[in-house]
Amino acid sequence: MFLFNLILILFNIIQIDSSFERCRQTFGSNKYDLNQLSHLTILGEEKPYRYVLTPCGLVPTDKCGSSTLPLEQGMTSCQEKISEATFASAMGFLDGYGKSPNLEFNENPQGPGTGIVMTMRNALCNSDERFVNVTFICDKSIKQPTKMNVVEDPKCKFTIIIIAAEACPIKEGITGGAIFIIILFVLIIIYLVCGILYNRYKQNQTGLAVIPNLSFWLLLGGMFVNGWKFTWNFVRNRGQGTLSSSVSYGSV
């Protein structure tokens, strides 16, 4: 059961790492990773509104003002009416939440290595497209920024500037997901070796019985085979035009 839980955690880590990949961008020899800012809540004001942004992460909805309706999922930035402390609008959404177009990234036009620009066009502004251009400017002296400059000009077109050390090019390294996979495989090897030695010399088991938790591996293999058969039958019957309600997982 312990190993099964580790596998489930692995799948979640891979999914999260994949969702972060969009915020890792390479332009020429410069590599950027805005995920370094994904734990921050960055604020800006242009009265009568306050703006909140969590770059490459989900913005805390309690920072967006009160709302009588449930807020849409996937918001990375929001707009709050200051005088009433109420939610005004979403500013943009992360990829993967059914909003289009996806986030767009370009290197700062000031020159190579000076930062990265993120463009959001997947939220509405009075039924029209909301255009949000966020420029992250590289400055190694400012780490984990909390403030941003916001200007709306013309209407529904926003220019946001954030100065941060995290907007500077990074040295290429191994990702968190890859580190977790390496650790997981090392633990699996240790688990198998220790389990086999224990079963062989302490329990005096032989043959396949020396494999720790053999019943789990047999069950997992059986589920894999059944799933493969079901998928194969589904594809084959669909290709032959014979798919019917009689084809079910239980029939394999």
Image (tube, rainbow, N blue to C red):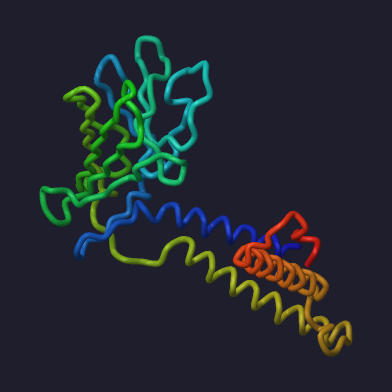
- Examine the image and state in which quarter residue 238 appears: bottom right
- Is 12 situated above or below 203? above
Q: Nearer the viewer, residue 212 or 234?
A: 234
x and y percentages locating residue 41 in the rendered image: 38, 34
x and y percentages locating residue 17 in the rendered image: 46, 57
- Is 66 situated above or below 109? above
Q: Which residue is situated farthest in the top direction here?
A: 83
- Examine the image and state in which quarter residue 25 appears: bottom left
For this view, does 201 lie left or right of residue 148?
Answer: right
For this view, does 186 lie left or right of residue 3?
Answer: left
Q: Which residue is situated farthest in the left direction here?
A: 110
Residue at 52% across, 16% down = 68
- Is 231 situated above or below 55? below
Screen quadrant of the N terminus: bottom right
x and y percentages locating residue 206 in the rendered image: 85, 89
Count of residue discs: 0
Residue at 44% across, 20% down = 65
Q: Which residue is situated farthest in the front direction here?
A: 241
Residue at 35% across, 36% down = 122
Screen quadrant of the C terminus: bottom right
Residue at 52% across, 56% down = 15
x and y percentages locating residue 141 in the rendered image: 22, 46
For this view, does 163 lie left or right of residue 172?
Answer: left
Q: Which residue is situated farthest in the bottom direction here?
A: 207
- Examine the image and state in which quarter residue 212 appears: bottom right
